[in-house]
Image (cartoon, rainbow, N blue to C red):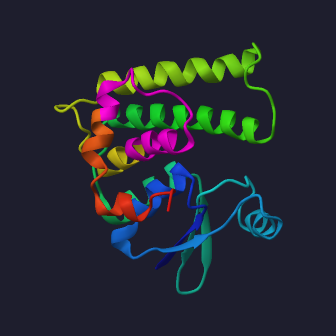
Amino acid sequence: MKYTLIGSTTSPYVRRLRIYLSSLHCEFQSMMIFDPKDRATLKEISPILKIPVLKIEGNESTEYLYESRVIFNFINKTHFKQNVSLQEENLLSVVEGVSDSLITLYLMKMSQVSIDEDKRFIAAQFERIEAGLKYLNDQVGPKNIPSCDYINISLYCLIDWIKFRELTDLSAYRELESFHQEQCIRSDYKLTDPRS
């Protein structure tokens, strides 16, 4: 099987899979999802128009997987066979919930939609971000680093994306800040840094 990961270089969801899949020599196809040509390509391969997408080329067929969690589960089951505890599944769900809310607010801001209004939907995003970051900060410490590398990668990519996009102040979350500082020396994190 040949794998190609399709997505943008700035997406935290794409970045985590680029790192996770690196040992499998997975190719990476960069796209700008709001560029009309790339958008048309994305429409052809994914009915949900989201990245990442994993292209799987077999001997006689080509398939596509959508959503980072589905891609992770497939790759883990097929290649790495790492046990993921219920606690780690919860951590990943919180990372994804916070990521989704931050991306929603970021896209609204980029679309010049006010995110300062006291609207229920916007308030719910801020509430989820605050609760999620507090939970992650409480759960991740020197003695509580998840054993599943994908969970660590996902958490790092979230924190680093928050810093990259300057989305929220993390100074109150000391464990998350420490985790980020300890992890940032990894070469695969440097190679996929969205700032470069």
Does residue 57 show up?
yes
Give the residue at x 43% y 39%: 159
Magenta span: 155-177
**Residue 177 sits above or below residue 2 on the image:** above
Q: In the displayed structure, does residue 152 sit left or right of residue 154?
A: left
Q: Nearer the viewer, residue 18 or 147?
A: 18
**Residue 132 sits above or below residue 21 on the image:** above
Q: Is residue 168 magenta?
A: yes
Q: Is residue 42 magenta?
A: no
Give the residue at x 28% y 47%: 183
Q: Residue furthest left?
A: 143
Give the residue at x 80% y 70%: 37
- Magenta span: chief secondary structure: helix
Please provide percent x and percent y for residue 127. Answer: 58, 17
Residue 136 falls in image quadrant? top left
Please provide percent x and percent y for residue 170. Answer: 43, 28
Please provide percent x and percent y for residue 79. Answer: 34, 66
Q: Nearer the viewer, residue 112 or 13?
A: 112
Residue 133 falls in image quadrant? top left
Please provide percent x and percent y for residue 8. Answer: 61, 61
Q: Nearer the viewer, residue 102 or 93?
A: 102
Does residue 87 show up?
no
Q: In the displayed structure, does residue 143 sit left or right of residue 152?
A: left
**Residue 10 sits above or below residue 181 on the image:** below
